[in-house]
Image (cartoon, coloured by chain):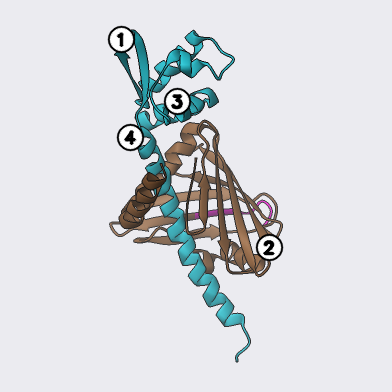
């Protein structure tokens, strides 16, 4: 994932309403009315959030009969998580080495026997 | 968003220019402080694998400055520098952090050592000027991390996929 795309994904995730919408969509596809129901905001406001999520590739939208359903797209989330996991691997490697150093230092300072 | 494996926990909330790292060590706060403030100890663990860490200077006192470089086998160097605010002590370490490849993007880092019995939990709090600056630094770490640990990364992702 390019840095720009990742910024778009994180920008989309930066809003609590949009994160709540994604959480709702993990339970299945939903139309805008169903998605707006838990929030004290208008359907047009939810539609704007859906546009941001769609722009980041986090959801796709399809028409079924008269309903326009939103569908969670997991791939960008997986990539965003992998991005953070790689940063964690960076520090994990360092701290594992620090574990060894600390153990060696304690071995030096412990009294013999 | 948080990811954890072994004992390292990294939290980087979307839209917030901050990174929190938490890691428990089987050592006293005093020993952990030494590992962070004695140059001959620091070079043994802080540098990326396959790179040589060279400390230019390191003055762990109030107003003291530090600079080190990570040198790759082909001679490519990545320089980092900063200033200590307050003398590093068991109360913690406060310092600025700047990657010389992105001058002006200065982070404020606060390290604290929380004693828990005969173990110590290290808390590292890094605050960046912007979310973009934070993400750029994470991407640098990611590139190094990816180069160092594809296998570990695969395991992490596999674990996360099974959760999600």
Can you identify the residue that label 1 sits on?
A65
N-terminal label among 4 and 1: 1
Q: For the residues tagged 4 and 3, is the chain the same?
A: yes
Q: Assess disc 1: are there few (<14), some (14-19) or many (≥20) residues with their C-alpha within 10 Å of its C-alpha.
A: few
Can you identify the residue that label 2 sits on?
B115
- State the cyan chain: A
Q: Position of residue B130 (x, y in %)?
A: 52, 32
Real-space CA distance between mark 2 and mark 3, rounded to the nearest whole angstrom: 38 Å
* Above-or-below relation of B84 to A43: below
Comparing labels 4 and 3, the label whose residue is closer to the camera:
4
Can you identify the residue that label 3 sits on?
A12
- Residue at 35% across, 47% down: B143
Q: Circle 2 sits in a helix, a strand or a loop, which is it?
A: strand
Real-space CA distance between mark 2 and mark 1, rounded to the nearest whole angstrom: 61 Å
- Residue at 31% across, 13% down: A63
Can residue B101 be spotted in the picture? no
Q: Position of residue B151 (x, y in %)?
A: 31, 57
Q: For the residues tagged 4 and 1, is the chain the same?
A: yes
Real-space CA distance between mark 4 and mark 1, rounded to the nearest whole angstrom: 27 Å
Q: Assess disc 2: are there few (<14), some (14-19) or many (≥20) residues with their C-alpha within 10 Å of its C-alpha.
A: some
Q: Which residues are magenta?
A: B61-67
């Amino acid at each position: 994932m390019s840095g720009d795309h990742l910024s778009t994904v994180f920008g989309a995730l930066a809003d609590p309403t949009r994160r709540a919408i994604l959480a709702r969509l993990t339970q299945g596809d939903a139309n805008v009315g169903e998605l707006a129901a838990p929030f004290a905001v208008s359907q047009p406001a939810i539609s704007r959030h859906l546009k941001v999520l769609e722009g980041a590739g986090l959801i796709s939208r399809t028409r079924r009969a008269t309903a326009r359903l939103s569908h969670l797209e997991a791939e960008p989330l997986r990539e965003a998580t992998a991005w953070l996991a790689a940063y964690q691997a960076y520090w994990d490697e360092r701290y594992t080495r620090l574990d060894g150093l600390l153990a060696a230092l304690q071995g030096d300072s412990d009294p013999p026997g | 968003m948080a990811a954890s494996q072994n004992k390292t926990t990294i939290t980087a909330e979307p839209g917030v220019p901050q990174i929190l790292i938490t890691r428990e060590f089987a050592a006293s706060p005093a020993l952990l402080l030494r590992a962070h403030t004695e140059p001959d100890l620091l070079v043994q663990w802080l540098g990326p694998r396959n790179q040589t860490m060279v400390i230019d200077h390191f003055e762990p006192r109030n107003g003291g400055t530090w600079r080190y470089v990570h040198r790759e086998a082909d001679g490519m160097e990545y320089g980092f520098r900063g200033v200590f605010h307050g003398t590093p002590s068991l109360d913690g370490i406060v310092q600025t952090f700047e990657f010389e490849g992105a001058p002006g993007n200065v982070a404020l880092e606060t390290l604290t050592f929380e004693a828990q019995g005969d173990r110590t939990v290290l808390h590292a709090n890094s605050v960046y000027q912007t979310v973009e600056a934070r993400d750029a630094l994470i991407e640098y770490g990611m590139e190094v991390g990816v180069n160092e640990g594809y296998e570990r990364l695969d395991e992490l992702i596999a674990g996360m996929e099974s959760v999600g």
